[in-house]
Image (cartoon, rainbow, N blue to C red):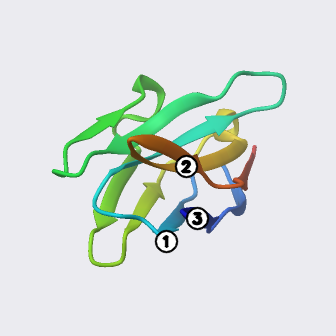
């Protein structure tokens, strides 16, 4: 059974930084891992993704501020978030995808102005 667990959310002032972590267990090989986010009343949108070869893709809203990276030995993906803005406030969901997609329960990120 694949399990995906996020950590690292919290409350930060605008301009600050946070680092999210996500570990997938019970997997059967490298897959694509990434982060989506969902603000209240809005749809869940892609934030950043890294494939098994290390290729990355970012939403325009976070380019230049967020960096996604992975540690294949730990099956863990990280999201370094700098220069945070109030509009980055959302629940951040991690996923692991290989044939099927598996989601974590999410971690709250709140950015105060």
Image vertical order of residue 104 relative to residue 89, above or below:
below
- Disc with the residue nearer the chain's start (3 vs 2): 3
Dot 2: within a 10 Å radius of its alpha carbon, few (fewer than 14), some, or many (20 or more) residues? some
Query: Taking 67 as reference, is 94 left or right?
Result: right
Q: Quadrant of residue 73?
A: bottom left
Judging by the rendered image, the residue that carries numbered circle 1 is 25
The N terminus - image quarter: bottom right
- Disc with the residue nearer the chain's start (3 vs 1): 3
Dot 3: within a 10 Å radius of its alpha carbon, few (fewer than 14), some, or many (20 or more) residues? some
Query: Could you tell me residue 46's position as x and y percent?
Result: 50, 31
Mark number displayed over residue 84: none
Mark number displayed over residue 3: 3
Spatial CA span between label 2 and label 1:
11 Å
Q: Quadrant of residue 36?
A: top right
- The residue sitting at 37% across, 42% down in the picture is 49
Spatial CA span between label 3 and label 1:
5 Å
- In this rendering, the count of numbered labels is 3
Query: Could you tell me residue 97's position as x and y percent?
Result: 42, 46
Secondary structure beneath disc 1?
A: strand
Secondary structure beneath disc 2?
A: strand
Residue lying at the far left of the rendered structure: 53
- Disc with the residue nearer the chain's start (2 vs 1): 1
Q: Are marks 3 and 1 in contact (CB under 8 Å)?
A: yes
Query: Could you tell me residue 80's position as x and y percent?
Result: 44, 58
Judging by the rendered image, the residue that carries numbered circle 2 is 102
- The residue sitting at 51% across, 64% down in the picture is 22
Which residue occupies the foreground of this view, 76 or 64? 76
- The residue sitting at 55% across, 51% down in the picture is 94
Q: Are marks 3 and 2 in contact (CB under 8 Å)?
A: yes
Spatial CA span between label 3 and label 2:
7 Å
């Amino acid at each position: 059974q694949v399990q995906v667990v996020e950590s690292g959310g919290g409350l930060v002032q605008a301009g600050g930084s946070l680092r999210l972590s996500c570990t997938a267990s019970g997997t059967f090989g490298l897959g694509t891992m990434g982060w989506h986010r969902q603000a209240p009343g809005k749809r869940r949108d892609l934030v950043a993704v890294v494939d098994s070869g290390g290729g990355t893709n970012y939403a325009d809203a976070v380019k230049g501020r967020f960096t996604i990276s992975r540690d294949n030995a730990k099956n863990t993906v990280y999201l370094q978030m700098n220069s945070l803005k109030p509009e980055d406030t959302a629940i951040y969901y991690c996923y692991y995808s290989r044939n099927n997609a598996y989601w974590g329960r999410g971690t709250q990120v709140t950015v105060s102005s």
